[in-house]
Image: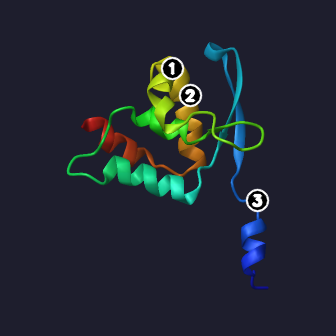
């Protein structure tokens, strides 16, 4: 059976995972980002002459932390505040976001070299 346009648009295809972040005192919801958000993040990160590594994890996590309705918790302008949080906590959330969004370890390792 071939899907039609409306079936594709109606599909709930962005998985999420709720994880405990003890440093923050509770649980957070980490979701797959939209294709548009992923493209924008990749362009920001890899689109210039040199990869943009500033707030690498915070920018990625900021696109993946959502509320119960699926809306982003952090705007692009709030990423620096997220980046100021515990590295251990942010990395825990980043690893889940990395898995959900199929961001390979090789890509992370390459950026960490810069």
**Marks 1 and 3, the one that precedes in the sequence:** 3
Mark sitting on residue 92 = 2
Verify CB contact (< 8 Å) between mark 1 and mark 2: yes
Residue 12 tag number = 3
Q: Foreground residue, 26 or 106?
A: 26
Quarter of the image with the N terminus is bottom right
Which element type, helix, strand or loop, lies under badge 2?
helix
Distance (Cα) linking label 2 and label 3: 25 Å
Q: Which residue is drawn at 45% across and 19% down?
A: 84
Say left or right for 55 vs 49.
Answer: right
In percent of width and height, residue 41 lies at: 44, 49
Q: Is mark 1 on a helix, strand or loop?
A: helix
**10 Å crowding of disc 1: few (<14), some (14-19), many (20+):** few
Furthest-bottom residue in view? 1
Q: Could you tell me how far apart the alpha carbons at marks 1 and 3 are, in whole angstroms?
A: 31 Å
Per the image, the residue denoted by label 1 is 88
Q: Position of residue 95 (x, y in %)?
A: 54, 36
Between residue 30 and residue 10, name the one nearer to us.
Answer: 10
Which residue is depicted at the point 72% across and 69% down? 9
Identify the residue at image location x=63%, y=40%.
72
98 lies above or below 82: below
**Which residue is found at the position 27% from the left and 45% from the top?**
51
Q: Residues within 10 Å of mark 3 (few under 14, many from 20)?
A: few
Q: In this view, does 67 lie above or below 84?
A: below
Q: Residue 66 carries which label?
A: none
Could you tell me which quadrant the C terminus lies in? top left
- When the figure is inspected, residue 2 is found, relative to residue 19, above or below; the finding is below
Dot placed on the residue nearer the N-terminal end, 2 or 3: 3
């Amino acid at each position: 059976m071939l899907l039609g346009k409306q079936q594709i648009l109606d599909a709930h295809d962005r998985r999420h995972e709720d994880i405990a972040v003890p440093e923050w005192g509770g649980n957070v919801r980490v979701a797959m980002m939209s294709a548009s958000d992923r493209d924008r993040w990749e362009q920001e990160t890899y689109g210039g002459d040199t990869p943009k590594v500033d707030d690498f994890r915070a920018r990625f996590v900021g696109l993946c932390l959502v509320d119960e309705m699926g809306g982003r918790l952090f705007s692009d302008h709030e990423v620096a505040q997220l980046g100021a949080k515990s590295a251990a906590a942010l990395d825990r959330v980043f690893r889940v976001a990395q898995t959900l969004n199929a961001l390979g370890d090789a890509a992370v390792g390459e950026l960490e070299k810069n």
